[in-house]
Amino acid sequence: MFDCHKQLDGSIEYTDDLMDYIGIINVLMDAGAEVDALRSFMQRLMQSSITKEEKLRYLRSQRQKLLESIHSKQRSLDQLDYIIFDVNKTSDFTIKVSSIDGQLRDLSLMLAGY
């Protein structure tokens, strides 16, 4: 994908553009971008065959997916915090935890010896 320039000693010359592309890839991979879509995006970006609108559409789509993942993790964290709170109150309890599909399910937990 990258046009790298090797020096006589075998080291690679990293241009500013190459470093920018690597930075974009790192950010998008950390954000959970799918490899094939990212590869296609980067090829078009590096070949200057992508419009500003297409860039923004892809980047905003990746942002939305990341935001949804964050919200999902936050819901899980909130539920876990509630379970911890409830455990601190008593060692014999039943709680209701919302599942992903929105239905409530009972979790009956006996914590003998804790």
Image (spheres, rainbow, N blue to C red):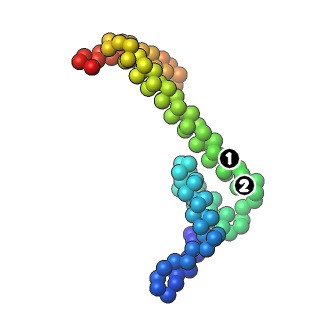
Residue 36 is at least partly visible in this image = no
Front residue (pair 8, 55): 8
Relative to residue 50, is residue 93 depicted above or below? Answer: above
SS class, disc 1: helix
Quarter of the figure with the N terminus: bottom right
Residue 54 badge: 2
Residue 60 badge: 1
Real-space CA distance between mark 1 and mark 2, rounded to the nearest whole angstrom: 10 Å
Please provide percent x and percent y for residue 112: 25, 16
Contact, mark 1 vs mark 2 (Cβ under 8 Å)? no
What residue is shown at x 67% (from left), y 63% (from top)? 45
Please provide percent x and percent y for residue 33: 56, 51
Relative to residue 93, is residue 1 depicted above or below? Answer: below
What residue is shown at x 52% (from left), y 84% (from top)? 7
Which residue type carries mark 2?
A: Glu
Please state which of the two labelled residues, at mark 1 or mark 2, is closer to the viewer: 1
